Amino acid sequence: MVDSARSGSIVEQTIHPDPTPKQRGGLGAAACRFLWLLPALVLACVCARALELFAGMQVGTTFHDAVRIVGLAIRQDVLSLARYLPGLFLVSLPFLLIRSRRGCFWSLGITWSLLVLVQVFLAQYFLTARVPLGADLFAYSWRDIRETVSAGARPDATAIAAFLLPVACLWSLLAWLIRRPWFTPSLRTTLAVFAAALLALFAAPVRFEQRAETEDAYNLALDKAAYFFDDSLGYFARPQAKDAASVTAGGGAASEADAAAAFQYLDPRYPFLRVEQTPDVLGPHFTIRAGQPPNLVFVIVEGLGRSFSGPDAALGSFTPFLDSLAGRSLYWDNFLAVQGRTFAVLPSLFGSLPFGDNGFSALGERMPARADTLLSVLKGQGYHLKFYGGTDLDFDNERSFLQRQGVEVLVGDGDYGPGYVRSPGTTSWGYADHELLSLALARENRDTPQPYVSVIQTITMHTPYTFPGQARYEQRFEQRLDALGVDAQQKDAYRAYRNIYASILYTDDALRRFFDEAKRDPAYQNTIFIVTGDHRLPEIPMSTRIDRYHVPFYIFSPLLKAPARSKAVSSHFDVAPSLLAFLSHNYGIRTPRAVTWVGSGLDMAPYFRNLHDVPLKQTKTNLVDFVSGDWFLNQDTLYAMSDGMAIEPIHDDAALARVQARFARFRAANDRFAHDLALMPADAAQQLVAYRELERAAPAAPASAGVALAVRDVRTPALAHVGDLTVEVDFANAGSLPSAEFVPLIVLLSGDGRELSESYGAAMTLAPGQEVSLRLPVNSRGVPAGRYFLTVIPSDPKTGKSVGVGRHQIPVRLQD
């Protein structure tokens, strides 16, 4: 009996390595058992992480950069494991208390397998979308989620291995550990580990900040499961707006001019309600014809980003037609979409409407009945409204929003009929852009005397990036690389996204055909075309945190007197106010006396400046970005902006506090609207008035002010010869004190970011408000012909470090 008992004790100790018999089967023993078996879960997560990093590393990433990303990933993962260790233990506790080895093994293995699969799914989502999934998951309906996942799902051997290998590692090591305990922690050691984990949970940062990395590299290094849980917890634990809150978007009191925002707010019960003050800045650029007001045609291009479209695009432009259109249009270089995904583009572009919790359209049937938009105002004054899309219009509640604005013609993927071909594959969103634009041209009523607004929303530049004739456009992609002068070493980095670049060329070609065909329409001569992106597609990695919002914006029309190019910052929020002011001033369209615009109108200044406060909603649940004056705020990090929407981190506590205060005012007003769903009183929507010049005033610059010493502009030749490159640089001091002494420094960089040369100008200082333009030679001797980048900074004469805000990633092309 003694031997039997001793034998059982040994088996029991093998299965449950408890320090003392008294603790066997209790909470302490379960905690010890958890640490004993935890390496199986850790190994599975390490395997999943290694596969993610291997698949997610950009082609052309240097060894040094790869080491930095892996090092940051290890730090993030260790921090996440420490913070979530108590939670993992609580999830595992019921199974650790099972005294049967078989029962413990199977129940724990299944539970941990589910956790590993969640981690792998989140990693695969990021590798597809290049954006980590957070609480925005909960802002979509199951129908929208199913459609998104099915459209983005492209299972292949690599993706299947990413799911199978980590789970295989988990079960293999778990089976080995549960039979052969290699480590039996004491209760004291276990308590010390959990005490450290609890300390990390409450005292450690949620994640490490690494400003020097690109946004894509930082997102790759994030622990995707920890990000998802942290963001979800923050979303569900967020404070709710209070009924008694009395706030306006500008922070001012009712019936009192808010000096900070230069808006006259009317009633704190309606936090966005203010007097309409938008001036007509577009009228001087147009030939005004008496009679029928012009037609408006909006083309909202899915995923169109400034980094790969337009003059001086950082990646080179893959939209040659739109580039030619820019030369014939009013064109804004520094234009912002106000959402990181499509969910808010219609309310922001046509209504300059606040977001609410998850985007205005997400309110569905709860959308306020009284909301003046460009569409509803024009509908009430004789305009015919039409919308054409290639997808399901119920996605993101677009159909509901458009119907509430009075749109009469709604065309979605169920309305195409014979003769139109869906995009190939079972995971497409619907009809590709050639089919969409052909249908829009065919359905336009060319003979109606009624003015109209037509809205066309494309889809091809979206995951899964499949479309008819794809092979032909992939060949044109190779030709485009040669036309852009991309050197052989850099071509592989572009080819990693071949299907995406091919889709951009395809959509650009579809737009070329659309505009060519539109010329045959008799209404063409009295039509204004507005083209913009809904946001920048994320799958081509983004270099900065503001890149996702930086989109082109064009206003083209045969009525234009001459093309013009603005470098001032404007956004989707500013479009509806300016178009209505233009129509009111020049064609007698009556506009609301009181409005709920978030924006204040387009800025046509030819130089870089920003007169706006622009809240930017990254996802449906993530409102953490804000632009004010020359500043960009992300979370609690402040960046200085410059031409090209270049951003540079700045340590300025006073400026940070001012920008945070302005952002807080907007968030408070937005929260109040989300709670009350009140935009304006019933009688306000009925008060339409004529344009009166004296009541319209351009917005003042935000009180958050601007950066003192900065590079305002850099002008490069379209094509220069090796060894003979000269650029023009504008330096400006916007501060109230003389600038520090600085030396103009120009760094020539290869396509992969290696420094090739440095060039200097003479040391100087600038008086308050002074601006100077310099012609500076750049040392380009000995480099081969090709595409390069410039960095220009005001540098300290002694240390070489920047003493102001520079410009980065300025493309330049050299030939022999």
Image (cartoon, helix red, strand yellow):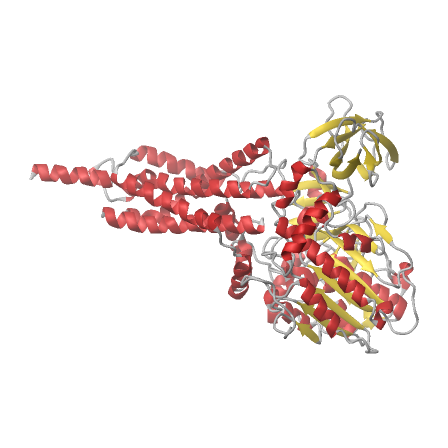
The quarter holding residue 322 reads bottom right
Seen in the picture, residue 643 relative to 768 is either above or below; the reply is: below
Name the outermost residue toward the top: 798
Examine the rendered structure and indicate whether residue 405 appears above or below residue 478.
below
Q: Residue at x 61, y 73 (%)?
A: 414
Asked if residue 667 can be seen in this view, the reply is no
Of residue 563 and residue 589, the one placed in the foreground of this image is: 563
Quadrant where the C terminus is found in the figure: top right
Q: How many labels does the image show?
A: 0
Q: Position of residue 97 (x, y in %)?
A: 27, 47
Placement of 812 over or under 100, stated as above or below: above
Task: Name the spot of residue 355 as percent of width and height, x first.
Answer: 65, 60
At 82% from the left and 71% from the top, the residue drawn is 521
Left or right of 314, for residue 361: left
Q: Which of 282 and 51 is in front in this view?
A: 51
Can you say which quadrant of the picture contains the N terminus? Answer: top left
Q: In which quarter of the image is residue 770?
A: top right
Whole-percent x and y of residue 220? 55, 42
Q: Nearer the viewer, residue 399 or 815?
A: 815
Q: Where is residue 565 in the image (x, y as percent from the top left)?
A: 84, 51
Taking the spot 85% from the left edge, 50% from the top edge, the residue there is: 605
- Residue 439 appears in the rendering: yes
